[in-house]
Each structure stands twice: as structure tokens, then as C-alpha cells.
Amino acid sequence: MDIRNKATRIRLFDFKTPQMRAFHLSWFAFHVCFFGWFGIAPMMAVVRDDLNLTKTQIGNTMIASVAVTVVVRLFIGLLCDRIGPRRTYTWLLCLGALPVMSIGLADSFESFLLARLAIGAIGASFVITQYHTSIMFGPNVVGTANAATAGWGNLGGGTTQILMPLVLSGLLMLGVSETLGWRLAMIVPGLVLFLTGIAYWHFTQDAPDGNFADLRRCGELVEAKNEYGARASFGSAIRDIRVWALFLVYGACFGVELTINNIAALYYFDNFELSLGTAGLIAGLFGMMNLFARALGGFFSDRFARLSGLKGRVRWLFLTLLCEGVALILFSQMQVLGIAIMTMVLFSLCVQMAEGATYGVVPFINRRALGAVAGIVGAGGNVGAVAAGFLFRSESLSYQQGLFFLGIAVTLIAFAALSVRFPQGATSESGEAGRPVHDQPRTPAGGHRTGEQMS
């Protein structure tokens, strides 16, 4: 996909350019999706008692919440190629709000399971976020842009752990019972999701020079068909072994983060005998590291690219993932609350830097099939979460044992990152792309442009 006039700088306080509006709204939309996706997780102790759920049943709902996202993520990138990220995000947000608000109608394990399965579709929002920033920002800052938007989106996993128990507490103070309280609390993220979808439609556009439909009409963008169509794009991506290596890698970092988001509050509630509010607050620290950690992973990916091209990006990815595995093994062995929290924070730092480092590599795998590559790698995160979920549904394994085995798996998968290699020419090109260049002037769709074309 050939897109001109990408931004070569990130100006955080600029809300006028289409690049920065897409930057801010994409991370905020993903952040809100986390509220809907994992809003129920910090209230699971209450839900467990209300619906009489067993550990195995809770594990099954955790798996359901991330399983459907695998399928949706595989195809959401292709949909972005076809109709553009603006329209795709708007539909996902507005439709995704419905199961979030209706989960409160669940009155059995089966209905609760189906609701969490339906809600999982909004997890595909991550792919749209990465897609939108990848076509809005140039190669010298795309790693930082992708990591920052995804990280601040993932931050929703932390703020959800903190805020949803507070929402529930506020309802209880009004005299609402716990049984009704958790159901009413889920209406809040549902409403925010819907309103964010409306805002995304009105305040963003697909590319720096306009929406895909307009650019195709005036010949500025090729039609998404034949060699540029979904079948060709997806086929090209699935035949590339590097895509599947990153699929595994992302499963070992983002998949682990999703797992921790699901179990953290319950883990601290049961293992350290804390109140639901305190457990949620501590669990929230894990997600709060996204405030800077994932962006840091992307930032250093760009820096390493300036030193040694794409090889530098890959080596940085390997290092962060290896550190994540070791830190997770250490966290699983902690018995003292204070030390457990400190180790969790270190582990969280490594997890999120590895995520940022992964999507510092993704835009350079296959630029014609960007949507397909982003979708497949993103789906890997959810496959990792599904696989990890089986460790935590077993009655024969404690959560600590599950975390230990997960840490060993992450350490081994880290070496898969080293199989991601690029031709010598591509490595040199990335090194050049990593050098700062002047911002290219914006021109209206169909107008004359100057400057180097970026793809």
C-alpha cells in the first residue's frame, strides 16, 4: 500500500493534523475497548459467588474472552485494507458496546460464557490501532507511534482493574445489592464504547490525505482487488515464516498480559487474603506500566534501527522477551506481598516493552500486506492467551504453578525472535528510514505532492 505524506514526528499536543488525531483517538478507542473487554475481571469474585462458578468454569470464561478475538483479528486487518480503519473502528466500537452492556443479563454459567465470548470481538481493536498509526507515520517514528498508541490502549487493562471496583462500590453505597451492582456497573463501559465509536467517525480519516474511498475514486490509491485484494494479501502473509515467528512471539508477550489481566485481581484476593478493592488496586499496577513501558519498547526499537537497521530491532525484541520470561518465573515464586508486587512491576515492564518491540518490526515485514500481517501477529497474542488459559483452569495446578510453567514457555519462545531475518537491502533501507527527515507537506487528495514517496 502506497501512502504519501506520513508524519515523521510525533507532536503529542497537536490535535489539528489528521495524523495526530488518528494517533490520539486510536489509543483512546483501544483503551476504552479494554474497559469493555476486561471490565468484568476485577469483579469476578462477586460474579463467582452470584453465579456459583467453579475454578474450571472461570477458566473457561477466561478462554472464551480471548478465543473469539483470534478469528476476528485475523480478518480485521483485511477489512481495514478494504474499507479503511475509520469505518472499521466505528462499526467495531458501536456493535461491541451491545454485548458489554448485556452481560448483566447473564443468569447462568452458559449465558455468562456466551456474553464473554461475544465481548471478546472488541479485542480486535488493537489491530486497527496499529494499522491506523502504521499508515499515518513514517518509518523513522512508526515503532514509537505503534508502541505508544498500543501501550496507552493497554493501559485500559490497569485502569479497569482500579476503576471498575470503584464503580461497583459506588453502586453499593447507593443501596444496590452486589448481585445487581456488577450487572449495572458493566453498562458504564458499554456506553463509553458507543460514544467513542461516534467520535471516531467524525474526527478521524483513513490516511494523511483523506479516506480510502475518496483516494480510490481519484486514483490516489489502488483498489483492494487482484494482487492488492484480501486473498492475495492474506496469502502473501501466511507464506512468510517471519510472520509466524512474530505470531509466537506476540503470544508470549501480549497473550501473557491478557492472562494476567484476567487472573491478577483474583490471584491477589485469594493468595494474599486481600479485599476486592485492594486486590484490584494492586492488579491495576500491572496494566498501569503501559503508561510508558510499551512506548519505551517501540522507542528503543527505532533507536536500535538507527544503529544497525532491522537486525537491531530483532535483537532488541529477543532481549525484552527473554527478560520477560525470567521475570515471570521470579514472580511466580514470590510469597511476600511487597516483594510480589515489586517483581510483578518488573515483569510488567518487560512484557510491555516486548509488545512494543514486536510492532516495531511488523510494519517492515510486508508493506503490501500490512493489514494481513498485523492481523495474524495480533491474533497470536490471543492464541497465547488461550493456551495460557488452560494452565489456569486446571484444578490440579495452582495459579503459582501455572505462572511458573508460563515463564518457562516464554523464555523458550524468546529464541523464535532470532529467526526473523531480512535481506541485506531491506536492512540498509531500514537504517536509512530510521534517520530523521523533514516533515512532508500535506496536500489535498488529488493534488500535486513533492518529496519522497513512502509505502
Image (cartoon, grey):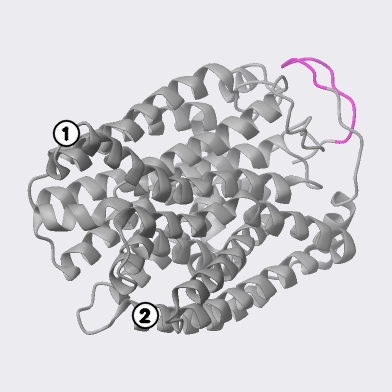
Answer with mark 1 or mark 2, whichever residue precedes in sequence. 1
In screen coordinates, is 148 left or right of 351? right
- Where residue 97 appears, as percent x and y from the top left, is 32, 32
Label 2: which residue? 400
Q: Which mark is residue 344?
A: none
Q: For the point 63% across and 55% down, which residue is it?
A: 294
Task: Rate crowding at label 2 as few (under 14), some (14 to 19) or many (20 or more) other CA atoms within 10 Å.
Answer: some
Question: Which contiguous range is marked in magenta?
Answer: 442-452
Q: Type of residue at label 1?
A: Gly
Between residue 15 and residue 171, name the one nearer to us. 171
Q: For the point 45% across and 64% down, which residue is it?
A: 255
Q: Which mark is residue 175?
A: 1
Q: Is residue 232 visible?
A: no
In screen coordinates, is 436 left or right of 224? right
- Where residue 276 appears, as percent x and y from the top left, is 30, 56
Q: Nearer the viewer, mark 1 or mark 2?
A: 1
Q: Type of residue at label 2?
A: Gln
